[in-house]
Image (cartoon, rainbow, N blue to C red):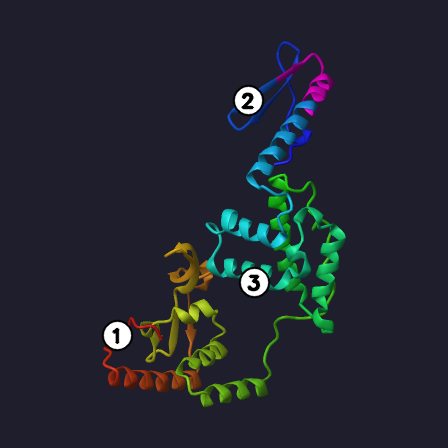
Amino acid sequence: MHRTISNYKITKRKNGRYYVRLQDGGDITHIYGKTKSEVQAKLDIKIEELNILDRRRTEQAFPTRNITLANWAHLCLNTFCASSISGNTYVGYERYIRLHFGKLADMPISKITNFMVQEHINNLSRLGGKEGMSEAYLTRVKVFLHMVFNYAVQNNLIVVNPTLGVKIPKTGLNENRALTQEEELRLLSAVRDFNKPFMFIVVVALYTGCRKGELFALKWRHIDFENRTIKIDSQLIREYTPFVHGKAKTVYTPKDPKTKNSKRLIHMIEPLAMEFMEYKTMQLKWKEEHGFVHSEDDYV
């Protein structure tokens, strides 16, 4: 971490002298002075010494200060983030590195300037001469870049985070919109004509508005045909596992819903109830033909 004088508090002792305490790992340094300005002057010198020492430690940990943005981002992702973020978030961050870092990816992080980052964000907003990314998506890319450069500052690879002050262009794009009734009918028709039964999930999503993880977690015991309800009490999410048989992978795990209020009962309108009945009849027939015993704890 790059130290500054604002990180330390100078206090006045009972004997009238001023004092500050610094810690570097397990080493503790005490600085005393007759006046506060005297202690501040000594503190400035000591802080500079410690910052130089930190930089030397970093150079030893990272043989080259010319580590590229992509390499540093992957290092941060696996060192600082993997144990504290969900699998979906991890995969999303990897996607940013792979698809949205552009020419910055292969540049040394110490050479990337605020102007370059702003120019890159501007280019993403009109990618390929088209409309480009939405403001919300651009914001997520910038937040990830900010985090990666912050870790570089903390490890003394750079002095200032180049994402500071970068503005998100007004694209006017809206990621989400409601389907028109005509579009809904066309979607339902396309799904019914598709020869893969798993496309039924699109029908349920359209009628209920459930999140993807909630739909994947549905079991037949959650479907109450008598009362025409669907019980939402869990979600199936992707968890990142750093090393499985020497490889990075994600596994699906049942978890509580995203928020407390996400546990709920959803009323099935008649068309959806009919769709569910047809789907279950088809699934039961398939299980019987292939020697599977049906259980109400089976996933829909």
What amino acid is at disc 1? Ser
- Expressed as whole percent of the image width and height from the top left, the position of residue 169 reads 74, 62
Which quadrant of the rendered structure holds the C terminus? bottom left
The magenta stretch spans residue 228: no
Query: Mark 1 or mark 2: which is in front?
Result: 2
What amino acid is at disc 2? Ile
Badge 1 element: loop
Q: Mark 1 — residue?
A: 295
> How many dots with numbers?
3
Q: Nearer the viewer, residue 253 or 262?
A: 253
Q: Mark 3 — residue?
A: 95
- Expressed as whole percent of the image width and height from the top left, the position of residue 137 reads 63, 64
Q: Mark 2 — residue?
A: 28
Badge 3 element: helix
- As drawn, is 212 to the left or to the right of 56? left
Q: Label 3: few (<14), some or many (≥20) within 10 Å?
A: few
Tell me the residue at 59%/77% (across/down): 178
| Magenta residues (range) | 31-44
Q: Label 2: few (<14), some or many (≥20) within 10 Å?
A: few
Which residue is outermost to the front?
A: 63
What amino acid is at disc 3? Arg
- Expressed as whole percent of the image width and height from the top left, the position of residue 112 reads 71, 50
Residue 166 in which image quadrant? bottom right
- As drawn, is 119 to the left or to the right of 95? right
Counting residues from the start of the chain, the first of labels 1 and 2 encountered is 2
Tell me the residue at 26%/82% (across/down): 290
Which quadrant of the rendered structure holds the N terminus? top right
Badge 2 element: strand
With respect to residue 116, does 282 lie above or below? below
Question: How far, Cα to Cα, is label 1 from label 2?
Answer: 64 Å
Question: How far, Cα to Cα, is label 3 from label 2?
Answer: 43 Å
Query: Mark 3 or mark 2: which is in front?
Result: 3
